[in-house]
Image: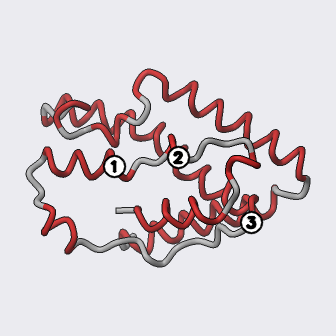
């Protein structure tokens, strides 16, 4: 689960000052609820590995790069969600909420993130390089955690 990453992101930046509502973009709860629906016990859930090797998110640029990965994953999740439904009968209501992301609103939410990130970068200046490093680090951390 990537709860530690969301917790770190929540603490690393003053999201209100940055003009972004990070709290409504947290997805750990969706994942927890899905796993419970799929009969994963709380004890089992607690025993699972957590992504504790985290990317640097202390600067706004790095945090934006990390969010790029998390928000972008919702686009790919749409394909996974469809496959879950077709092959396994798992729907957003029966354990597939996390991969369904924002549902029919996923494209709009992705564009809203992109607009905000560009505006934040234009306002602060010089965020492109740290955002790129933040995204690269996030991909590497997930790869290491998932062992690929």
The residue carrying mark 3 is: 59
How many C-alpha atoms fall within 10 Å of the one at disc 1: few (<14), some, or many (≥20)? few
Say which residue appears at 49% left-offset and 63% top-offset.
Answer: 7
Mark toward the start of the polypeptide (3 vs 1): 1
Q: Secondary structure at mark 1?
A: helix
Spot occupied by residue 143 in the image (x, y as percentages of width and height): 45, 68
Placement of the C terminus among the 4 image quadrants = bottom left
Foreground residue among 115 and 89: 115
**Badge number at residue 78:** none
121 relative to 137 in the view: left or right: right
Q: Is residue 16 left or right of residue 8?
A: right
Q: Label 3, label 1: how many angstroms apart (C-alpha)?
A: 25 Å
Which badge, 2 or 1, comes first in the chain's sequence?
Answer: 2
Residue at left 40%, top 27%?
103
**In the rendered image, which quarter is residue 83 located in?**
top left
Q: Residue 20: x, y in percent?
A: 67, 42
Report the residue marked by disc 1.
29
| For the residues bearing labels 3 and 1, Cβ distance under 8 angstroms | no
- Tell me if residue 103 comes above or below residue 42 in the rendering: above
Q: Which residue is mark 2?
A: 23
């Amino acid at each position: 689960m990537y709860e530690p990453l969301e917790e770190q992101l929540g603490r690393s930046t003053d999201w209100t000052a940055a003009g972004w509502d990070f709290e409504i973009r947290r997805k750990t709860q969706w994942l927890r609820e899905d796993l419970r629906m799929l009969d994963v016990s709380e004890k089992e859930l607690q025993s699972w590995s957590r992504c504790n090797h985290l990317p640097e998110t202390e600067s706004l640029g790095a945090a934006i790069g990390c969010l790029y990965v998390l928000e972008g994953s919702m686009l790919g999740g749409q394909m996974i969600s469809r496959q879950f439904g077709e092959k396994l009968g798992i729907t957003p209501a029966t354990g597939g909420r996390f991969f369904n992301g924002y549902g029919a609103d996923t494209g709009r939410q992705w564009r809203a993130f992109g607009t905000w990130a560009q505006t934040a970068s234009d306002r602060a200046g010089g965020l492109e390089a740290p955002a790129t490093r933040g995204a690269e680090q996030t991909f590497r951390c997930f790869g290491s955690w998932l062992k690929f």
